[in-house]
Amino acid sequence: MLAVIYLLVQGLGLWMAAGGLWVEEGLVEQIIENPELGIVQNPESVESSGQVFLYILAATAVILLFIKLRLGFLMNIFVALSIFIGMALTLSNLLGTAGFLAAVGVSVLRLWKKENVLLMNLSLIFAIPGVGSWVGASLDVLPALVLLLVLTVYDIVAVFGTKHMVTLADNSKSGSSLMFSIPVGERCLGLGTGDLAIPLIFAVSLLREYSLAASIITVCGGLLGLVALFFYITQEKDVLLPALPPITVGLLFGFGVSLLIG
C-alpha cells in the first residue's frame, strides 16, 4: 500500500509535468514558456527556494494556530480547501472540465465521510500531484535541491526539536488531516503530504534540465528510502521518525545513478 501510494502520487505528478497521454503540454513546458504561471518569478535563483520554504512555514503556522486555539471549524475549512485546490489542479490538468467536476464531487464526498480513511487517502493521492508538480515545474534543479535539503533538516528539527510535527500527527486522528494513514497490524502509521510532495518537487524540477528517465530513476531511489524507513518503524513500538531524511537519501542516490547511466 505504501509503495502504491508513493508511486501513484509521483507518477501522476510527472505525467502532468512532462505531458503525454491526454496532456498536450506538460506543466514544465508551460511554465518555461510563461514564467508568470509559476509560483516564483526567478526559477534559477536559489532565493526562490527560500520563498517556497516561507510559504510552507506560513501554511504550517496557520494549521498550528487553529490547533492551538481549538478552532476545529476553521481547521476543517482550511484542510478541505487545500485538498480541493490540489485535486482541482491535478484532475483539471489531466481531464479538463470533467476533472474539475470530479474534484468537486470527491471533495463533497470527503466532507460527508470525513472519517473514512480510504477516502482521505484517495483524495490526498489526487491532491498532492497538482501542487507538487506546479512548484517543481517553477524551480530549476539547484533551487529545488536546496529546498529539498533545507526541508529535510527542518523535518528533523520539527520532529525532535520543536516537536510541532508530533502535534500535527496527533491532530491527524481527529479527521481533519493532511496525512495518509497506513494500517500496520493494530496501529496506523502516518505519512505527511510533504513527505510525498517534496520528492515530487525535486523530481519534476529535473525535467527542466534532464530527461524523464532521470526523474523516474530519482523517484525510485526515494521509494527505497521510504520503504526502508517503514520496515524499521514496523519493527519498533511507539516510535515517531521524520520520513523525509531517508527519502532524501534515496532521491539523491537515484539521481546519482541517473547521471551515471545517462
Image (spheres, rainbow, N blue to C red):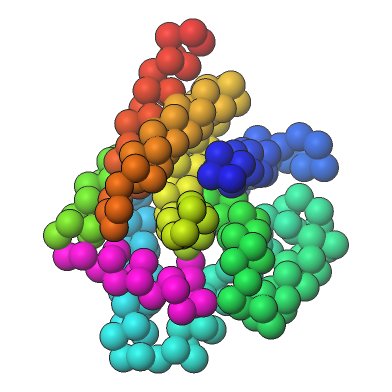
Residue at the extreme left of the image, as rendered? 161
Picture residue at 81% right of the left edge, 37% below the top: 21
Evaluate whether residue 137 shows in this view.
no
Q: Judge left or right: residue 225 versus residue 177.
A: left
Residue at the extreme right of the image, as rendered? 98
Q: Judge left or right: residue 186 versus residue 34.
A: left
Q: Is residue 113 magenta?
A: no
The answer to which of 255 and 225 lies nearer the viewer is: 225
Residue 51, percent across and down? 33, 57
Residue at the extreme front of the image, as rendered? 186
**In terms of secondary structure, what is the magenta stretch mainly?**
helix
The answer to which of 250 and 39 lies nearer the viewer is: 250
| Vertical placement of residue 164 versus 30, above or below | below
Q: Is residue 177 magenta?
A: yes
| Vertical placement of residue 86 versus 44, above or below | below
Magenta highlight range: 162-178
Instruction: Write down the quadrant of residue 250 in the picture.
Output: top left
Picture residue at 52% right of the left edge, 56% below the top: 183
Picture residue at 55% right of the left edge, 39% below the top: 3
Picture residue at 79% right of the left edge, 66% below the top: 102
Residue 231, percent across and down? 40, 38
